[in-house]
Amino acid sequence: MSWQLPAGSPYALEAKELSVVLDGRKVLDIASLQVYPNEVLMVIGPNGSGKTTLLLCLALLIKPATATISYRGIPILNSSHTLQTRRRLAVVFQESLLLNSSVWDNVTLGLRLRGVKGGETRVRAQEWLERFGIAPLAKRHAKTLSSGEAKRVSLARAFVLQPEVLFLDEPFDALDSPTRQALLEDFEGVLRETRVTTVMVTHDRNEALILADRIAVLMNGRIRELGTPQEVFGSPVDEDVASFVEAGNILRGVVGEQSQGLISVNVDGQHFEAVSNLPVGTKVTAYVPYEDVTLAVVAAETAQTSARNQLRGRIVKVFPRGSQLKVSLDCGFMLASVITKRSWEELGLRIGDELVACFKASSVRLIPKH
Amino acid sequence: MDIIIDGVVQAFRLLIHGDPEVARIALLSLAVSLSATAISLFIGITLGTLIGLTRFLGRQFLVGLINTGMGAPPVVVGLIVTVFLWRNGPLGMLHLMYTPSAMVIAQCIISLPIITGFTLASIQQIDPKLRLQILALGASRWQLLWLLVRDTRLPLLAAVMAGFGSIISEVGASMMVGGNITGQTRVLTTAIVMENSKGDFGLAIALGIILMILVYLVSMALTIVQQRSKTR
């Protein structure tokens, strides 16, 4: 199975001067946005920031006030052009939006609309029903499914089309937490394997961290930041973005030891503890919010603290962040904290000073990498 | 009281022995009303779906017109059709006056707003996102219309029932444009009116029972289809 684009345009999808006006107000204003072949671009942002509108414009489902949208470098001009291009895409919405017929009918619908032959349709549909674990449901009526099953059908219905670009609008939002977790794992597996070019909207930071190659932060209809998860979560461009993404340290490591619900994570020869039951040897991405890291001056007698992690390091960088300062320490790996300017002054800190950074094992959010 | 008993007895005698004239009248009724329903369905569902999915200047006015049409008195429709089909009327050269075709035209005009109105209502209650999803699956405009209609088939069956019910039992327009000609344009309702005025209540009651049975059978068939697709 291959979704590789032929050589030609460097972008799977490109939008320029994209704007949408609603009731005289500009709800979307995007100078330019590029999506590379085989990447997963996550669009995050608060409610009402225009995420869904952006997705619908890119998927050619609503007409923006102005825009040049190109697929593989070819601008989409008229409506017959639009239909042809739409048939190279797939969209999964927040609601499952199944039609009033059987699961099989729903999964094969897109192929039938494209006039794909019966034999090929059967093979492809069967394959994707199995991939999402819903083959036994094929004959069931779609309206009798649970929300988790229905979501699997809507995902299978999109993947069976082997789209050039897959769009998803908060697809797991309406699901309860265990269902969501199971489905997210299956979905991640499928994404990694097919390497389908994906644009996904979410307001769930964990989803973004797990799935994204790049993250676009959308606020008030504008892209405020676009970069890798490390860039966006690690060094947000401004306060708004920072407060939305809950900026923090992103550390890549391996589980070294495990006992009593605590694991030790090795990062660049250093290690810290985290609350988890992940098995030894698991590669993880650890996320520690800046706000959860406190800094202590190294004294002869350090006060005892319940925080499991106390790492010694030297201040290498200080950066103003609104009324606060972001202080980066080299503890063997880079670890940053956000403190008030007053704390900085009262502790009499300077670049090069040695400090102890403390954070609780329960402050660490862990994302296993498959 | 005797009149009623005599009537019912005569009705069953006619039904059991199978009077050829009664059979012909019943079949013509069914043929005229079913063809009118079929034509109205085709036009009404397309029209209702288009109006339901689009926004244009004068849409509100059109919807108001359809809603008014849902309650239009058949005699007025009969009058308008008569004026048009009359020998010197604008469509007089078609020579359709006093033919079953004229009755089909009148009945189409009566049932069209009903079917269009029902379709419009059921299309408008569809989640607007379902429309986007169907487009996103690669549907062309016509494929979208067809899939939306297919997806709302339950309320649309109600439209069929209401449309058919309104014209099989209609008498004014059929009388005016058909003329109740023996062996040509006599249908159940016009025959009932005639037998009633002649004082032949037995035959009138017999025709009334047949009419009720026809309406029941058609509604029952549609109900079975509707209930089956609901529980499946």
Image: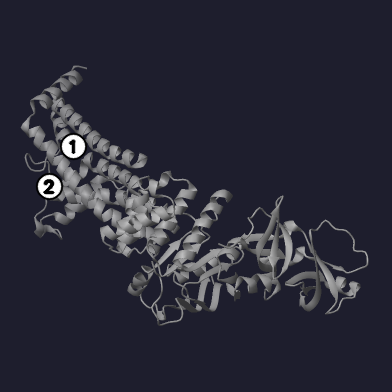
Count of marks overlaid on the render: 2
Q: Is residue A292 above or below residue A85?
A: above
Viewed as shown, does residue B174 lie left or right of A90? Answer: left
- Which residue is depicted at the point 7% across and 29% down? B19
The location of residue A35, given as percent across then percent down, is: 49, 75
Q: Residue furthest top?
A: B2
The reply to whether label 2 and label 1 mark residues of one chain is yes
Q: Chain of mark 2?
A: B
Q: Is residue A19 above or below residue B227?
A: below
Closer to the chain start, of discs 2 and 1, is 2
Amino acid found under the numbered disc labelled 2: Pro
Q: Which residue is mark 1?
A: B189
Q: Label 1: state its secondary structure.
A: helix
Amino acid found under the numbered disc labelled 1: Thr
Q: Is residue A346 above or below residue A151?
A: below
Q: Which residue is mark 2?
A: B100
Compare residues A159 and A29 and report the one nearer the observer: A159
